[in-house]
Image: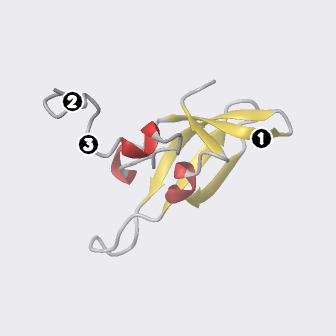
Amino acid sequence: MSEAVKSSSAPGSESQAFGLPAARRLNPKKLLLSKWTAATPHDKEKHFIVTGVIQPESPATRIESIELESVYSRRLFSLPWRDLTDGQQWLQGWQ
């Protein structure tokens, strides 16, 4: 009977079942105006909004960088968009 019971978990969620964090999948074209929280805030800058997706000169080249704006200080900086997939540095949404 145990063979007939199917797991209801989605494909690829096996890593979550063992307590390992699942890799966050992001599409750089859909990051514009998304909200992020710094895992370790500095200078009271905790919440950020993606205000720009930096397009490469050649349309055939992949997007590499984004522009983040701090909600608190309005300071702008750019970073590789793949850095947002690191759960030790960034949390998706405002928390």
Label drawn at residue 40: 1
Tag 2: Cα neighbours inside 10 Å, few (<14), some, or many (≥20)?
few
The reply to whether dot 2 and dot 1 touch (C-beta < 8 Å) is no
Question: For the residues marked 2 and 1, what is the alpha-carbon distance in whole angstroms?
Answer: 45 Å
- Which residue, as the protein is rendered here, is positioned at the far left? 4
**Sequence-earlier tag: 3 or 2:** 2
Quarter holding the C terminus is: top right
Circle 2 is placed at which residue position?
A: 2
| Residue 79: percent from left, percent from top | 60, 59
What's under tag 2, amino acid-wise?
A: Ser
x%, y% of residue 44?
Answer: 83, 33
Dot 1 falls on a residue whose secondary structure is strand
Q: Secondary structure at mark 2?
A: loop
Front tag of 3 and 1: 3
Q: Which mark is residue 11?
A: 3
**Which mark sits nearer the N-terminus, 3 or 1?**
3
Check the image and report above or below for 13 versus 7.
Answer: below
Q: Is residue 56 above or below residue 3?
A: below
Quadrant position of residue 74: top right
Mark 3 or 2: the one toward you:
2
Near mark 3 (Cα within 10 A), the count class, few <14, some 14-19 or many ≥20, is few
Q: Nearer the viewer, mark 2 or mark 1?
A: 2
Q: Position of residue 4 (x, y in %)?
A: 13, 30
Q: CA distance from mark 3 to mark 1?
A: 32 Å
